Amino acid sequence: MNKKIKKCLFPAAGYGTRFLPATKAIPKEMLPVLTKPLLQYGVEEAISAGLDTMAIVTGRGKRAIEDHFDRSYELENQIDGTSKESLMEDIRDIIKTCTFSYTRQIEMKGLGHAILTGETLIGDEPFAVILADDLCDNANGDAVLTQMIKMYEKYKCSIVAVEEIPMNDTNKYGVIAGEFEEDSIVRVNNMVEKPDPKDAPSNLAIIGRYILTPDIFDIIRETKPGKGGEIQITDALLEQAKQGNVIAYKFDGKRFDCGSVDGFVEATNYFYNKSS
Ligand code: UTP
């Protein structure tokens, strides 16, 4: 399992019902914080972590994602040589430096199922997963995924990013428990999807950043639907955790839940203040 991580999987097939009606015809992942779609923030984080192959799980109504990560000759022709050209610089660089591939999840059976759908794009190697609606920023240093890749290089097993949440919110997250190995590192021995606060094994919640070893695909194939009737990545990871093969990492930085209106507004204010 010594392969370097080059691929990042972006599950982006969900319906984004919390953002209706905005998400009726526009993918949630394309909603912009300031002028940049959430998914572009995710891709930029992956690039800064040294990854160059972006694998995106899409679904019906998500074509705007493919168009965004492609040339747009008419538009570019129109703005080339004008002051607006610079607004396209970042996305042009991304298209030049990365490869994008896509597959469709036909039925939205949960995050675990979306990750399994991505197997065809990933193959037999360790990979990163970014949920673009969890927008992360670390103003003072390495991006969250970069920090996690460093952890992977040390521990060579699946890594989940976690943060402390108010105990009342445990029913919104996958929650882990285990033994601290170092300051910010927990060897996971239990994980529960969206537990009631009274049943939660801790207040350490998994956020939308993972490094997964490829044995996860076979495990997901065997994983029965769990909470909400969906195939949960938390349930599959518990199988790896039972073998001591999952590390939870308390990352440095901020995370905004842009799948919720409150988190989205908070992120917008944060990035606006950062840019001005
Ligand atoms: P969420 O549960 O946050 O996304 O899934 P959602 O279902 O789109 O949002 P709501 O709750 O209806 O508002 C986390 C991530 O997993 C992806 C989503 O696109 C999102 O990035 N996902 C979820 C899939 O790709 N497929 C699924 O079947 C479920």
Image: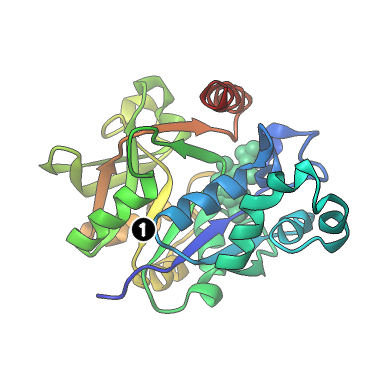
In the image, residue 147 above or below residue 122? above
Of all residues shown, which one is farthest toward the front?
81
Q: Quadrant of residue 223?
A: bottom left
Residue 206 at x, y percent in the picture: 38, 41
Asked which quadrant contains residue 80, the reply is bottom right
Q: Which color scheme is applied? A: rainbow
Q: Which amino acid does label 1 sit on?
A: Ile
Question: As drawn, which residue projects farthest toward the left?
Answer: 181
Q: Which residue is drawn at 78% across and 59% down?
A: 63
User: Does 249 sit left or right of 219 as displayed?
Assistant: left
Image quadrant occupied by the C terminus: top right
Q: Taking the image as drawn, is residue 234 in sight?
A: yes
* Image position of 219 (left or right of 55): left
Picture quarter with the N terminus: bottom left
Figure quadrant of residue 164 = top left
Give whichever of 149, 247 is nearer the camera: 149
Looking at the picture, how far across and down is residue 85, in whole percent? 74, 48
User: Which residue is at 43% across, 70% downward?
Assistant: 217
Horizontal side of residue 256 vs 63, given as left or right:
left
The residue that disc 1 covers is 211
Nearer-the-camera pick, 154 or 57 = 154
Residue at left offset 80%, top offset 33%: 21
Above or below, comparing residue 237 to residue 274 in the picture:
below
Give the structural element (helix, strand or loop) at label 1.
strand
x and y, in percent, of residue 234 in the image? 39, 51
Can residue 13 be seen by looking at this rendering? no
**Relative side of 172 to 93, left or right:** left
Q: How crowded is mark 1: few (under 14 residues within 10 Å), some or many (20 or more)?
A: many
Q: Could you say where residue 176 lies in the image, as x and y percent from the top left?
A: 29, 41
The residue depicted at 49 percent of the width and 45 percent of the height is 227
